[in-house]
Image: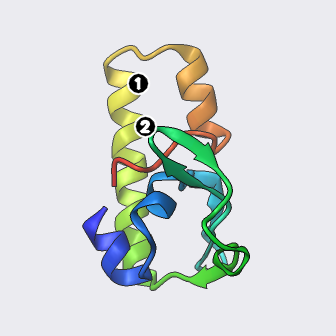
Amino acid sequence: MVLVAACLGLRASEIMGLQWGDFNWEDFTVLIRRGVVNGKAGDTKTEASRKALPVDPRLAAALAELRSAAYTRARRTGSSQAALADHEDNKTSCSAI
């Protein structure tokens, strides 16, 4: 979370709202679509917050490694097929960053 905050300058609520599907791994961008405040997902704080931001290739590599490790851990621990399907469909939250 600290690495993402430092590299992208996002609000904590925006980081908590990130999902893997928000990242465009080919263009190295992330689209800020939502924020999480008091445990509830909703719109970002301002209209200007909903924008694509460039992602440094080194940050993208670190996040891809984290995502792969999380997927491997989920498979190893026997997580439900629904959780794995959500992960594969980019719906899982990446706020554990």
Residue at the farthest right position: 47
* Residue 55 in the image: above or below residue 32: below
- Label 1 crowd bin: few (<14), some (14–19), many (20+), radius 10 Å: some
Q: Position of residue 30 (x, y in %)?
A: 60, 72
Labelled pair 2, 1 in contact (Cβ < 8 Å):
yes
Q: Which mark is residue 4?
A: none
Q: Amino acid at mark 2?
A: Tyr
* Residue 75 in the image: above or below residue 72: above
Identify the residue at image location x=56%, y=51%. 19
Read off the residue under disc 2: 71
Left/right placement of residue 36 relative to residue 82 reads: left
Left/right placement of residue 10 relative to residue 41 reads: left
- Viewer-closest of 6 and 70: 6
Image quadrant assignment for residue 54: bottom right
Q: How far, Cα to Cα, is label 2 from label 1?
A: 6 Å
Identify the residue at image location x=51%, y=81%. 55
Quarter of the rendering occupied by the C terminus = bottom left
Q: Position of residue 69 (x, y in %)?
A: 33, 44
Identify the residue at image location x=46%, y=38%. 39
SS state under label 1 = helix
